[in-house]
Amino acid sequence: RALLPARALPAGPGPCPRRGCGEAAALRAAGFSQEQARRLLALQPRLGPEQREAAAAQLLLLGLSAEAALALLERSPALLRLPTERLRERAEELRRLGLDGGRLERAVRRSPQLLHVPRKRLRAAVRLLRERCLFTAEQLREVLGTCPAVLQEEPRTLHHQFQYAYFRMGVQQKEMVKARLFQTPFAELRNRHIFLERRGLYETPHKGQTQISNPKLKDILQLPEEDFLASLAYSTPEEYEVFKKLLAREEEEKEEEDVDALYT
Amino acid sequence: EKWASTAPRIASTRLALHHFDTSYSLRLGALWPSVRAGLLCEQKYGALLNNFAAADHVPQELEPLNAADFVSEASQKAQQWQRGAAVGAVARGCQEGSGEGRTVMQAEMMAQAEMMAQAEMSPPLGASISSKIKCYTFPRGDITRFRPARPDSLGLLDYYLMDAASLLPVLALNVQPGDFVLDLCAAPGGKTLALLQTGFCGHLAANDISISRTKRLYQILHSYVPREVRDTVSVTSYDGRDWDQVKGGTFHKGAGAGSVLLQVLVDVPCTTDRHSATEEDNNIFHKRRTKERQMLPMLQLQLLMAGILAAKPGAEVVYSTCSLSPLQNECVVERALDIAEAQFNISIHVEDLSHFRTLFQETFSFFSDCRLGELVLPHLTANFGPMYFCKLRRM
Ligand SMILES: C[S@@+](CC[C@H](N)C(=O)[O-])C[C@H]1O[C@@H](n2cnc3c(N)ncnc32)[C@H](O)[C@@H]1O
């Protein structure tokens, strides 16, 4: 197979400048293919060779495949600059929170920013989920595995979303986990719920009872919008678009009112 | 807290919704969820242009925002169709000979067929839309709000914000120049003001039993109508059910033996569905008001009867409510027809208003299954109403 002409390669180190050759060899020894090593070397070109190697190796140690580690670094090259010690510490912490094996890989792949979150923040989120939202250890593992981004959230935001689902919608923890509650932005959760509610298709349980049978949170949140409208809300995109605008304005004005009330 | 003891155990709005869920879901079927969401979301307004104020700036201000006067749009449409109906008749005659253009023409004609049928069926279509009333609304799906009304140099406000569907009963009551008009339940006065905008009312009697609400009516007249026009309006506070006893004689005399007709608008108190579903204040579904609520259809019937008796032969009576309830709408009208016939030997013709549906379908969402009269359904993309109206002609 003919080699690609040099000018087609990304700017940066040439096909094999003297400096790059040793590094490439080290990376290949760590398990990256030649092509992968080349891509890796193109990231953060001013970085020292040991740092690059160590960071990449650390990611492989987390259980990431070479391709996954590379993809991750290409998405957040800044990870390469993190001291390896720190990187390891954070990975350790995530593992301790229950993200082991494939889960950690998936989580980090989905939100590479996780490796940037300070330990204090991670712990606060976990404490909130365990102690205030009363998720069991098993449920917590599931939440972290499916919505690792919760670890980057402000605990206040998480708590708000939890309380909304728990009190306003009457949903239990088990259902929240199944529905991957925290994958949905709060505004969308509220849009879909209140839309159903105003259409008479969702009711807050009173002492565990409802007059109508509510759709499952999982369906409300996980169905694509088109299916949500057609099979749960019996509505049209035109109606839903207007509704979202109206609700946003309502909320905005309620907040203004609340602020006014504070000062009078 | 102080008010805790008097607060209802169950919110009246919840009682209202529960009631609506049971009865309207039967009546409206698959439409009910949409209507319900409409009731519970912000309603849309229309800006009724005040023809008595210097308000030339209003169209210039509103049209760039995409608002349009739905009344004149409808009357233009009506005129087009009437011309179309004439052309259609010609086209039908020479259809045979046409070659290439034929399918196109046929498709076009198909699309117009329904409208033309309407136009042919109801000849006074164009004329029936009083072109002097102008009301601006934002298009379907547009949630822009109107700014509050502003006074002109003489202090008259430039427009009146109201549920645009409230204009339909007024448009249905086809006031002609010099007509004597009775607005039996007039306060706070939105429809009274619209009636005056026609510029045709020879005299307008605006009555409402509630003194406090007639105060609001006076305020509206003062803020929108110049003195000389105000002088043609007489505001009273009678129980409308007694209209014939207290006023019948004098008014008929006032109306004179001439050709001026007495047109009557009977815009009755009702369960005001939108209000009942959203506001605790003054809610007719409050436990304490159960009796009053149950008596509404009877009160409505009596008011409509009073309206029918006040109308001279040939005159029109429009009955309207802002409820979706057939018990307060068609049933009341049907009972009134029976009673008029049986007890008073008055025969009444129910006028066909189905052309309203065709003319105004872009602005409002109509219910297509009313036995009698027309009903505007709230819908998120056109959140006006509910508004029921039915037009009767005394024979
Ligand atoms: C739907 S509101 C009328 C709204 C008014 N037409 C408008 O467009 O602004 C019904 C009115 O009927 C009045 N009313 C109730 N009972 C009445 C009666 N027995 N006689 C006359 N008016 C009555 C109420 O005070 C109320 O103002």
Image: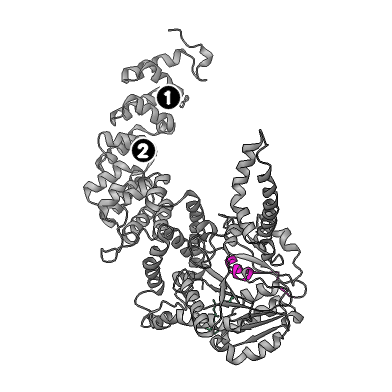
> Which residue is pictured at 49% across the width and 64% down the height?
B370
Q: Which residue is labeled 1 in the image?
A: A48
- Work out which quarter of the rendered image holds the N terminus of chain B and state it: bottom left
Query: Looking at the image, is mark 1 or mark 2 nearer the viewer?
Result: 2
Q: Is residue B242 magenta?
A: no
Which quarter holds ligand 1? bottom right
What residue type is disc 2 on?
Leu
Q: Is residue B8 left or right of residue B50?
A: left
Q: Residue B106: x percent and y percent?
A: 62, 41
Residue A78: which disc? none
Dividing the picture into quarters, in which one does residue A78 lie? top left
Q: Residue B205: x percent and y percent?
A: 65, 83
Q: Residue B390: x percent and y percent?
A: 55, 70
> Which residue is pictured at 44% across the width and 58% down the height?
B31
- Work out which quarter of the rendered image holds the C terminus of chain B and state it: bottom right
Q: Which residue is labeled 2 in the image?
A: A115
- Secondary structure beneath dot 2 equals helix
Of the image marks 1 and 2, the number of the one nearer the N terminus: 1
Q: Residue A57: x percent and y percent?
A: 32, 26
Dividing the picture into quarters, in which one does residue A32 lie? top left
Q: Is residue B310 visible?
A: yes
Question: Is the CB–ligand 1 distance for label 2 below 8 Å?
Answer: no
Q: Is residue B200 left or right of residue B2?
A: right
- Output the chain of dot 1: A
- Secondary structure beneath dot 1 equals loop
Give the residues in magenta.
B155-171
